[in-house]
Image (tube, grey):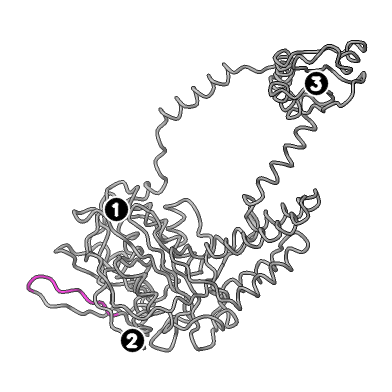
Amino acid sequence: MFVRGQLTRHPGIDPHTLTFAVLDLETTGLYPNKGSRVCEVAIVRMRGDGVVLDEYSTLVNPGLRIANDEIHGITNADVAHAPTFQEIAGDVLAHLGGAIVVGHNLDFEEKFLAAEFGRLGVSLQPVPGLCTLVTARIQLDRWGYKLDNIANLVTGEWPTALHSALGDARALAATLAKLIAEAPHPLAWAGRAPAPLPELPRTGRIAPRAAGLRKGSEGWLATLTARLPYMVDSPPPRPDGLRDYRALLTHALADGRIVGDEAAQLATLAARAGLTQSTARQVHEEFLAEARARAEADGIVTSTELKELQRAARELAASHLIVDLEEAAAANRARGNGPLRGWRIMPIGDAAAVMDVLDYAVEHGAKVAVNVTKTVRFVVSDGAAQDDPRVVKATTAGVDILESEQARKLLEGEVAKVHGGLFADPGGEELANRLAAERAATSRQARPEWHEFWRPQELTPGDYQKRFVDRRDDWDAAYEIHVTLPATAGRAPVAAVAQKKSGCAAAIAVGGAVIIGVAEFVRQVVA
């Protein structure tokens, strides 16, 4: 099914210009020829420069009992409402087509896809493929080439949802992007160019799993949403699943917070509803908007209602929908505690200049006086008649009467005193910012740690054979791995057999240069 190519230091195609489809499968066992089936699939389509173009992920109903849920966490209950592989076959091909298919031990994915498509009578030949396990072994001299180890080495982060198809595919995509962008020696693609794949009917039915949930700093639902696939063309949620998801969301938010068990239940219903990142956000935002509409129905949002909305918004990761309410509340609090707190100012007349002074004063905490009392700081007037009773009363009480310009300057001076503080120095702040910019401009980017393990030269086929294939102490006569060397000029394909318990063995010739490929026997044991 896959014709292997390689990322090599030799001349080839610039990988930045190519599209990659990073693939990962979770399965019910290791042997499709003995009945093991796919139970989850994920594909991350990305450009060689690391930009993610699309994601696809779904649980798959294998049609048999899952007995290895301790490995990937997928249970029989999880897949009961999931589509079968036949139902998703067209969507899988659409996301793999026109790209180089990437897998960490691609032979594992190959044998399962070949078996699944074979059941449907679909033969896929040839598809360009890249095995990053082989790439890592050829280019990096560090023992321990399992996906989580390589991902951590190259990206500096551990996969966030290990042994979930989308979590592993995302980790591998990030690793591949780093290898292409930051390799000490530029890497080129030596292999077939991407090509379209056969088209099958597409159902659009998905049941994405949100694995590896944690509360984090943004809440359970933010993690749940992030664990769902980013799909450019998300299918609409299934009505029955969406109804249940919203009902449970209402129940979970009744006390203002979501706990871990509730998040896990919501994740189960999100899969049954077929939610993606975009549709989940839409559901959450609509849910909060409806709650806000109920709060505003009587024309005022009370402080109690605002607190409820704030709690729900934090849980739903949708605080942007109530920013205006929070800003209005904050403005009210700021006015009550502003630098002019305790000041009472009385306006006389309704001239624009007087109103501007009044607005400025109220914005910074002052109150508007209606009558002249001894607590009034001053009266601001637009030149009203001196016989105005309020002017006469203010004069009698010894309250200053100021023109609008005088009043504005007085207020601005008081505000500046409070905001400036004892050690305010704009010049010092500007100097600090300039020095920081100079340091950032002159500092050199630290050399990535994984460069220390970059081989001086990439392994030759012979070296690879000795290091990763001819490990007789690991062999077991009970198992055999068949290795095929593709045809080269003037020579027919050559088949070989290696008896092994684990590890990989395959050699490929691409464009006249021999590249090493790998057939992994046990996926989880990659040394």
Q: Nearer the viewer, residue 297 or 15?
A: 297
| Residue at image point 38% right, 63% down | 45
Badge 2: few (under 14), some or many (20 or more) residues near its Cα, within 10 Å?
few
Disc 2 to disc 3, C-alpha distance: 89 Å
Q: Is residue 123 left or right of residue 52?
A: left
Disc 3 to disc 1, C-alpha distance: 71 Å
Residue 408 shows which numbered tag? none
Among the two numbered marks 2 and 3 on one chain, the one whose residue lies closer to the N terminus: 2
Q: Assess whether mark 1 and mark 2 are in contact (beta carbons under 8 angstroms).
A: no
The quadrant in which residue 114 appears is bottom left
Among the two numbered marks 2 and 1 on one chain, the one whose residue lies closer to the N terminus: 1
Among the two numbered marks 3 and 1 on one chain, the one whose residue lies closer to the N terminus: 1
Q: Is residue 493 visible?
A: yes
Q: Is residue 217 left or right of residue 31?
A: right
Q: Nearer the viewer, residue 15 or 347?
A: 347
The quadrant in which residue 97 appears is bottom left
- Give the residue type that dot 2 points to: Gly
514 over 388 or under it: above or below: below
- Residue 240 image offset from top left, x and y in percent: 61, 78
For the residue labelled by badge 3, is the local secondary structure a helix, a strand or a loop?
Answer: strand
Q: Which residue is mark 3?
A: 348
Q: Is residue 486 magenta?
A: yes
Q: Which residue is mark 1?
A: 16
381 over 165 or under it: above or below: above
Residue 118 shows which numbered tag? 2
Q: Mark 3, mark 1: which one is toward the viewer? A: 3
| Residue at image point 21% right, 66% down | 192
- Give the residue type that dot 1 points to: His
Q: Which residues are magenta?
A: 482-490
Disc 2 to disc 1, C-alpha distance: 33 Å
